[in-house]
Amino acid sequence: MICLTNLNVAIGDVLSLESAAAKRLKISSDSIKKISIARKTLDARRYKNAPIRYVYTLNITLENSLEKKLLHRFFKDKNVNQVVEVPLKVSRPIVDKAAVQPLVVGFGPAGMFCALTLCRFGYRPIILERGRDVDQRHRDIEKFWKSGILDTVSNVQFGEGGAGTFSDGKLTTRIHDTKINQVLEDFISAGAPAEIRYLHKPHIGTDILRVVVKNIRKKIISMGGTVKFSHQLTNLEIIDKRVQSVIVNGKDRVPCSALFLGIGHSARDTYEMLYKNGISMAVKSFAIGVRIEHPQTLIDMAQYGEDAGNPQLPVADYVLTFHDKARQLTCYSFCMCPGGSVIAAASEENRLTTNGMSNYARNSGIANSALLTPVTPADFGNDVLSGIEFQRHYENLAFMVGGGNYSAPVQTVGDFLEHNSGDDKFLTVPTYKPGVCPVDLHNCLPGKVAAALEAALPYFDKKIHGFANRRVVMTGLEMRSSAPCKINRFKDSYLSLNTKGLYPIGEGAGYAGGIMSAAVDGINAALSYITVDKNMTQSAKI
């Protein structure tokens, strides 16, 4: 098989991929037995008036004799190489572990893929999820968005699939672990579009992701796992620095020898319980800010120019960063959602926070993104739980400033920069539900964050003309970008620093930053446990 890289295809090019590849390799299209996309990226740069184009990496199967000829002909061409197709490895049980039932707490990406990995090696994990199944969870969330009645058990933060299920479903990650491919294949098998294998910025969308997580749950159950909803971890029983059992819903005792803790970034009561039990933890930095909304056409025009609106192009996104070294002010875009909406993401009563979400089609016509500023222990204190109290304080402020009914505080960019309030002539209708209240966002933002936004908005407007249009609406507050504390663990074993049998995993433990990295972290923790358990089993037999 030949791998052809850096194949440029202009968006207006009518050639098929087979024809484009054949033209590049100087062969006939009929010579190609099979062609598949390994990578697809969009290059919207206008270098020397070049058209917008897709850049492909293709795997091409030819007759053996022709393949040898091409490799000889293009031996100096770094974009033509031979590759050996390696089939995806599917794990098999190493021993009969049908009686072993590790506990997995949390059914977000980390817990889900941890459990799936354990099942593949013959274990029968029990998964405890404090929230509800994704279908009921969806109904509970819709009720909240329509009525302002929050369910603290089932919401955007808690329930099957984790917080990422009600987001954009982005699958981009900065980690370079080969297990990413396994995660993608599992998503595809569960109903995700096959294009996530090769897109540079793959996403699933919340509408498809709800189906995917349900199908993965069914797969885990078919392999011997058990998933229990409305089962919240409320205490630990630790003897001789080892987890012996857990308490569920404040009353039920469940023995365990291995506990995988994938609690997510918003399980504040669980953090408090862990701290009281002496689990090794540390405070960590995170970021807070607001959501900003623009017409999607504005972002498309900034990215694509005259080609904006071309059906061959995806809706455009952006990445913006501002840093003022002299004043030590930083602001950056985060979780940008093309064609999406701003959503109510509260999980505690009388506290308000937002997030961004979009369906697979990204066709709302509105682009939104968080604009965040980092905050550190220097801003809120060095105690393990001080970051949580900082979040709660400002979430309560946002709730009160917004009217005390989960309506979000909003403000136009013009009013914000001029320290005015009350203008409701928005460039786009705010997408946040159950409602919004025009206020001065300075009244619910830390001074450092407000100052960073004031400095960053004019700078961003130079990058994207119209970004800081005075009628653009900002919605407060974005508070759950990452966990406010960290559950310490050993790097290689994934075990807690001071509690045997406890495996902190995923974003909530401080070791991931999105769906993919959390899923891979769950897999790696499971594999670490399996390796240790296998060695112990072999030693016992000897």
Image (cartoon, grey):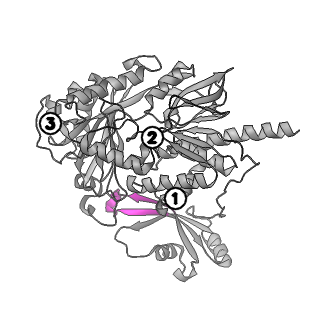
Residue type of the residue flagged with mark 3: Gly
Which quadrant does the C terminus fall into? top right
Was residue 45 drawn as part of the magenta stretch in this picture?
yes
Q: Nearer the viewer, mark 1 or mark 3?
A: 1
Expressed as whole percent of the image width and height from the top left, the position of residue 311 reads: 31, 66
The Cα atoms of the two marked residues, 3 and 2, are separated by: 40 Å
Discs 3, 2 touching: Cβ within 8 Å: no
What stretch of residues is rendered in magenta? 38-56
Looking at the image, residue 77 lies above or below residue 296: below
Which residue is disc 3 drawn over?
414
Looking at the image, residue 235 lies above or below residue 231: above
Taking the image as drawn, is residue 18 in sight? yes
The Cα atoms of the two marked residues, 2 and 1, are separated by: 21 Å
Q: Nearer the viewer, mark 2 or mark 1?
A: 2
Pointer 1 or 3: first along the chain = 1
280 relative position to 492: left or right = left
Q: Nearer the viewer, residue 149 or 202?
A: 149
Residue type of the residue flagged with mark 2: Gly
**Circle 3 residues within 10 Å: few <14, some 14–19, many ≥20:** some
Which residue is disc 2 drawn over?
131
510 relative position to 467: left or right = right
